[in-house]
Amino acid sequence: MQVWSDLNNDQQRDLLARPALADNKKLSDIVSGVIEQVRSQGDQALTELTKRFDGIRLAKFALSANALESAAREISPEVKEAINLAYANILAFHKAQKPKPIKVETSAGVICESMQKAIHSVGLYIPGGSAPLPSTVLMLGIPAQVAGCKRKVLCTPPNANGEIAAEIRYAATLCGIDEVYLVGGAQAIAAMAFGTQSICKVDKIFGPGNSFVTEAKQQVSRVAGGAAIDMPAGPSEVLVIADGNANPEFVAADLLSQAEHGPDSQAVLVSNNAQTIEQTKAAVERQLETLSRSDIAQKAIQHSRYILTDTVDQAIEVSNQYAPEHLIMQIDNARDRLDSIENAGSIFLGQWSPESAGDYASGTNHVLPTYGYARNYSSLGLADFYRRFTVQELSREGLENIGPAIMHLANAEGLDAHRQAVAIRLEQQP
C-alpha cells in the first residue's frame, strides 16, 4: 500500500506508470518488420507469420460460408441466448446514437450543412489468445452494422487446429459479417491496412489487442496509403475508487476481472480507507485461488497498485491523473461525484455496477482507450464508423451579403485568387 500524500511528484508519476510501456523501441522495431514483410510479400508473409506466431500453416485464410452458418448449431442454447441478449442491448444503445444532419442558414442566402456517411470498408480485429471474445465481435460489428458500412472485414487468430470459436462465428453472423479471415497479430493489422492477395485493404481499423497489435495500428495509421484507426486500445486496465463503505469482496472481484485478461493488464485500487485496502488485498488472494486463469491473473496482479489517499476527492484526482480505461466508483453517492471525473474510458457507478456488465451486455461499448489515452480519446461509438462532411450553398443574395467580407479577408491574407473568385461573380450582371 502506497500513501499518496507521502510521495513527491516523480514518485506519484512512477506509481501510475503502465507496465507494458517498457522496451518500446524493441517493440516498435519488431512490429515495423512484420508490417514491411506483409507489404512486400503479401499472403506468403501471412503464411509464414501465422506459422511462427500461431503454430499452424494454413492453406487459405478466408473462413468458409459453411463454417459461419454452422456456428448456431455448435453452441449451447444458454450461450446462444446470452449472445442474443447482449446483441439486443448493444444494438439498442448504438441505434440511439444515430447522427442527424444539420442545416443552418448562417446569413440570408447562405446555407451550411453537416452530413454523415458510413465508412465504406472497415476492418474489425478480434484478439485471440487463451479465450474467445464474441463480445468484442458484437462491440465492433454492431456499430458497423447500424452505421451501414458496406464491407465489414473480421480478422482473428486461428487456434492450433486452424479454427475459430463457434461463439465468434455466431456473433459475426448476427452482425452481418461474412468476410472473416484467420489471421491475427500485427500481421493482421498490416494485411487490413495495405491489402494482400487474399485480403483487400480497408479504410479504417477497429479493435483492441496486445502491445504488438496496438503498435501496429499506430504505425499503419501514420503511413500514406495505410488505414485510419479507432484508438490506441491495448492491454486492459481498471481503477477502482472505494471508500470505507465499499464491499472488499466486490472490489477484489472487479480487480481480478481485469487481471485475468492477460499478464500485461493492470488493476489499481485507490481508497481513502486503509482497512478497505487491506481487506481487499486479502480478498484478492482468496479469490485468486478459485479462478481457472489464476496463473494469468497472478502475473497481472504483480502490476497492481494499492493507493491510500486522504479523501475521496483526492482519490478522484489520482484517477483523473491515471486516466483509466475502466473506472469503477464504489463510493457513497457515486453519481453525485460524476461531474468531478475528467478522464476515463467508461465509468461504473455504485456497488451493483461491475465492469463485467459493460464488457458484455449492458449496451455500452467495451472498446476503450488505454495507457492514459482516455485524456484525449473517447470510448468507441457509432460516430466512429462515419465520415462527416460539410455542404454549403449560396444564392446570389447570399454571396452579395458575405462577399465583401470574404474579399477583405482574402486581401488581408494576400490571396488574390480567392478574392477574384468572389469578385468575378459579383461583377456578373443578374
Image (cartoon, helix red, strand yellow):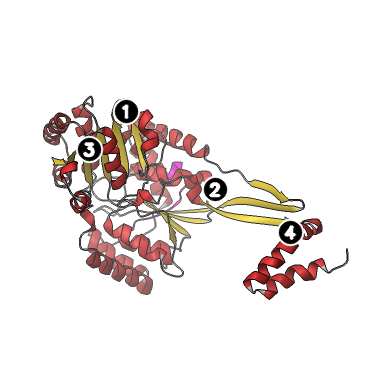
The answer to whether one can see residue 274 in this image is yes
- Callout 4 amino acid: Ile
Look at the numbered disc 4 and give the secondary structure of its residue.
helix
- Residue position marked by numbered label 4 in the rendering: 402
Q: CA distance from mark 1 to mark 2?
A: 35 Å
Disc nearer the start of the sequence (1/4): 1
- Callout 1 amino acid: Gly
Look at the numbered disc 2 and give the secondary structure of its residue.
loop
Q: Position of residue 71 (x, y in %)?
A: 37, 42
Residue 175 magenta: yes
- Residue position marked by numbered label 2 in the rendering: 148
Q: Nearer the viewer, residue 366 or 329?
A: 329
Disc nearer the start of the sequence (3/1): 3
- In the displayed structure, 383 sits above or below 50; it is above
Residue at x 18%, y 42% (from the top left corner): 5
Q: Mark number for residue 350?
A: 1
- Callout 2 amino acid: Gly
Residue at x 88%, y 66% (from the top left corner): 429
Q: CA distance from mark 4 to mark 2?
A: 38 Å
Q: CA distance from mark 3 to mark 1?
A: 15 Å
Disc nearer the start of the sequence (1/2): 2
Magenta residues? 172-184
Q: CA distance from mark 3 to mark 2?
A: 42 Å
